[in-house]
Amino acid sequence: MRKLLLQSLFRQPLTEQAPRPDDAAIAELAATVGRTARRRLGRSLSIREVDAGSCNGCELEIHALSNPYYDVERFGIWFVASPRHADVLLVTGPVTKNMREALERTYNATPDPKWVVAAGDCARDGGCFAGSYAVVGGVSA
């Protein structure tokens, strides 16, 4: 055990450095996303994330979108606290019996035009939680 620990402390990592981002491609992508959002909505895209009963795996990835590395706000994509300000409902996790009514109320509070995006297998069809007594199913249920 000691030998393995010492080897892992002094050995170089086996991973490779991430490639440097192409600043011109990122700027072009930001302009394209901004133009598309303004053409379809007349403004930037606002997302309300709803956790319908997940294990928080998807939330970790979604929250990472706001960190300085990804920074989706530079593309005109905003996460909002109220469904009344949202264009998109981003649902994570299987819809549980306790969250079904709250999810329906959130959907009804979102102004038209609106889109619903199911993030991950759990939101799509219940995922590994499908068949549980507490799970209604995916977002379409």
Image (cartoon, rainbow, N blue to C red):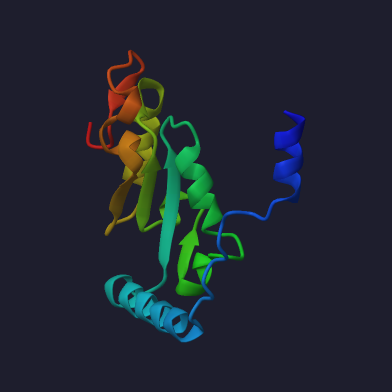
Residue 132 position by quadrant: top left
Task: Specify the farthest residue to the left.
Answer: 140
Looking at the image, is 124 positioned above or below residue 13?
Answer: above
Can you see residue 2?
yes
The residue sitting at 53% across, 45% down in the picture is 60
Q: In the depicted view, which residue is nearer to us: 30 or 114?
A: 30
Q: In the depicted view, which residue is nearer to us: 6 or 42?
A: 6
Task: Specify the farthest residue to the bottom.
Answer: 24
- Across and down, in percent, residue 96 comes to 37, 24
Q: Quadrant of the C terminus?
A: top left
Q: Is residue 112 left or right of residue 8?
A: left
Q: In the depicted view, which residue is nearer to us: 124 or 114?
A: 124
Looking at the image, is 99 positioned above or below residue 72?
Answer: above
Q: Quadrant of the N terminus?
A: top right
Looking at the image, is 39 positioned above or below residue 8?
Answer: below
The residue sitting at 52% across, 73% down in the picture is 74
The residue sitting at 40% across, 84% down in the picture is 28
- Across and down, in percent, residue 77 comes to 45, 66
The residue sitting at 36% across, 49% down in the picture is 89
Q: Is residue 102 left or right of residue 10?
A: left
